Image: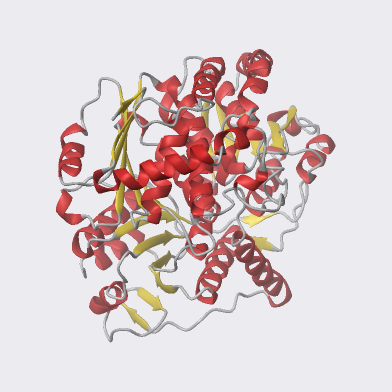
Amino acid sequence: MPIRGLRVNPGKYGDLIENTLTDLRESSVLDRMWSGDYSVWKPEPAGIADRLGWLKIAQKMREDAVRLQRFALDVKACGYTNILLLGMGGSSLAPGVFRAAFGVCDGYPDLAVLDSTDPGAILYHANRLDPAKTLFIVSSKSGTTIETISFLKYFYNWMSDRLTAGVAGDHFIAITDPGSSLAELANRYSFRNTYINAPDIGGRFSALSYFGLVPAALMGVDIRRILDSSLKMEKQCRENDLSMEKGNLGCILGAVIGTLARGGRDKLTIITSPAIECFGSWVEQLIAESTGKEGKGILPVVSEPVGPPGIYGDDRAFVYLKMAGDDSCDSVVALLEDAGNPLVRLSMDDLYDLGGQFFLWEMATAVAGHIMGINPFDQPDVEASKILTGKLLEDYGKDGRLSDETPVLTCDGISVYGKPLSENMEGMLEAFLKQAEPGGYVALQAYLQPTGETDHALDELRTKIRDRYKFAATVGYGPRYLHSTGQLHKGDTGRGLFVQFTADDARDVPIPDEMESKASSVSFSVLKRAQAMGDRDVLLNAGRRVMRFHLGVDVTDGIETLTATI
């Protein structure tokens, strides 16, 4: 069913999707959304009426694009060679997409994103960066995100120790909401610039606001073209035509994924051309955090090696996002389609079409939320992990230690925490995975330093789990996933299995109590451990099944050992 840039093969779900589109048309959902009617989702305005700014932000940003690009030229002229963005979740994922897609633009600084509290990740950047040529972007909607503020305190002091007194602030800019404590810090420490974002936009819907576009401009991306692409998609998503043949793209995509989820196809598998694989991580947060609540949820499966149709369960739906001229995934996608799987094809002419894709998926997610009967703009189960982490850190401040459970098994340098399901290491992971229910999934949660070697080892493990048990397996680094899929893990149907990985840190890094202070009450290693423990406890309290493997000092060897047991 061809539509401009979108084609749907609904499989056996065609009639259900048509019925959904009829319901959307008869209830005037589109007109109500564009008028800001909160009752599209819930009978009360709380958490909705003040979160609809994403619908119209692109035009406002288009009017500001020249100013942003002038600032980018000023930064470029100052000789900066590197930018490090300090942020989590909605503050970091869109900039990461721009960097991965566009690379290093000629003459502009190279942008990297820090969204890990692992001490090794902190030290990696501290050891490679030249302070005189580095600009930091401190990005937090609330201004109180514990990871981001910890990064800021560490790197501000790092910069102050290496530069002439009083100039460190010139190497920092802030992106935040009005009146936040981060805005106050930026003013107090004379940051080079502070961008105050529209407060009526949630983090995961902020790609086309300052949170996404300031970093993009600084690395040399033509944000006017990004916004023009978005505005073109926005115009298309205002159309009231909801016919499958030529209708509103955002509404149709939302109707498809929402209807399929209600029909049991709730593992939304995103396949992309290699050049835009990075886009999947942004979609993952948007879909998971928006839909995983009230005992419902759509699990995004991203960056998964594509396999033959026979290894997938009947809970999968597929989206194929293809760059023009790239047919590298065409044959495997055709096999999935021929096997009767529902599949949506999306196309992009060039990288600047990412602007349109950001808006398309935001609209589709909002529509899917309506279909599923949830508020797609809140995250009610995220706060619990933050509270428990804070309590653990408070206890640590009192007695200098984190209390932990006793391992049920220790062998070959690996300690296992959880229920004793086997007497030996060979059977422990297998016994845990055999608890999977129909329609279940496994989430691998890695509180480890993100490296290429660890990425590869985790991908091998997730693929072997999928091929052996025929259910979806996802991978997320902690605490990054807490700001992405963490909401879904606690708020969905409850059929997930959660495997945590921790390890010994070769070195630790103290977190300064304050900027310009040498005193430190806690370290990044302690923070990371508290976040893992806090999230584990919240999962257990929600009735989820969790097993933790502490890998000791050799991370990749430990993961490979566990992979061999399956």
Q: Residue at x 54, y 25 (%)?
A: 234
Residue 241 point in image, percent of width and height: 46, 27
Count up the numbered dots: 0
- Pick whichever, 89 or 70, lies toward us: 89
**Which residue sits at x=56%, y=59%?**
508
Q: Is residue 484 visible?
A: no
Q: Residue furthest front?
A: 26
Looking at the picture, the colour scheme in use is: secondary structure
Q: Is residue 435 above or below residue 138?
A: below
Query: Residue 345: x, y in percent?
Result: 30, 33
Q: Is residue 4 left or right of residue 56?
A: left
Q: Is residue 480 above or below residue 414?
A: above
Q: Is residue 150 visible?
A: yes
Q: Quadrant of residue 49?
A: top right
**Front in this rendered view, residue 439 or 62:** 439
Return the x and y of residue 266 as percentages of the image width and height: 37, 54
Residue 45, compared with residue 522, is above or below; it is above
Name the quarter where the C terminus is drawn. bottom left
Q: Position of residue 384 (x, y in %)?
A: 63, 66
- Dividing the image into 4 quarters, which one contains the N terminus? top left
Asked whether, in this view, residue 343 is left or right of residue 405, the answer is left
In terms of depth relative to the viewer, which is nearer, 344 or 135?
A: 344
Query: Is residue 452 found left or right of 536 in the rendered image?
Result: left
**Along the horizontal axis of the image, is 214 left or right of 322?**
right
